[in-house]
Amino acid sequence: MKQVAITVIIGAAQTLVILTAGIDLSVGAIMALSSVVMGAFIFQYGIAVPIAIICGFCFGTLCDHAERAKIAAVNLGRFLTIYCGVSRKLEGVSPQRL
């Protein structure tokens, strides 16, 4: 039941985004990438869990802001910009490279 709570929270937030006529395909990719960063900080670098969680949130926020800045700079449609955006480029990042 604890694993479902995270999916429900993300799904509820994504529903609000879709209802406001926006679409964001990067939510899942950024969430997965942030969890990899948190895991790497905890297990590879030995950083305390609360600090690793804060770093994961900051990393996810940074990825989202990078995509939003790209949308504003290029002035393309949101769907195309996000689909070809940061989350698409970072899919191949492995925890060993962090």
Image (cartoon, rainbow, N blue to C red):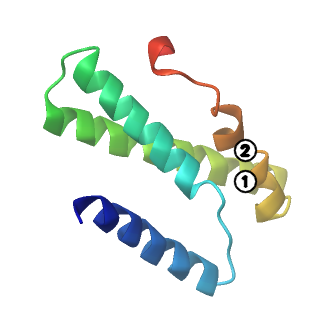
Q: Is residue 50 left or right of residue 88?
A: left
**Any part of residue 59 in sight:** no
Quickly name the residue at label 1. Answer: 82
Q: Quadrant of the N terminus?
A: bottom left
Q: Residue at x 29, y 14 (%)?
A: 44
Image quadrant where residue 38 sits = top left
Which disc number belongs to residue 85?
2
Q: Position of residue 22 (x, y in %)?
A: 67, 75
Give, as a three-letter code, the residue at label 2: Gly
**Any part of residue 23 in sight:** yes
Q: Residue at x 61, y 44 (%)?
A: 66
Q: Quadrant of the C terminus?
A: top left
Q: Is residue 50 left or right of residue 91?
A: left
Q: Residue at x 29, y 67 (%)?
A: 5
Crowd around label 2: few <14 · some 14–19 · many ≥20 (10 Å): many
Q: Kindly indicate whether the residue at mark 2 contacts the one at mark 1 (C-beta within 8 angstroms).
A: yes
Q: Residue furthest front?
A: 1
Q: Position of residue 39 (x, y in %)?
A: 32, 30
Crowd around label 1: few <14 · some 14–19 · many ≥20 (10 Å): many
Disc 1 element: helix
Q: Position of residue 51 (x, y in %)?
A: 19, 34
Between 16 and 74, the one lying in front of the other is 16
Cα distance, mark 1 to mark 2? 5 Å
Disc 2 element: loop
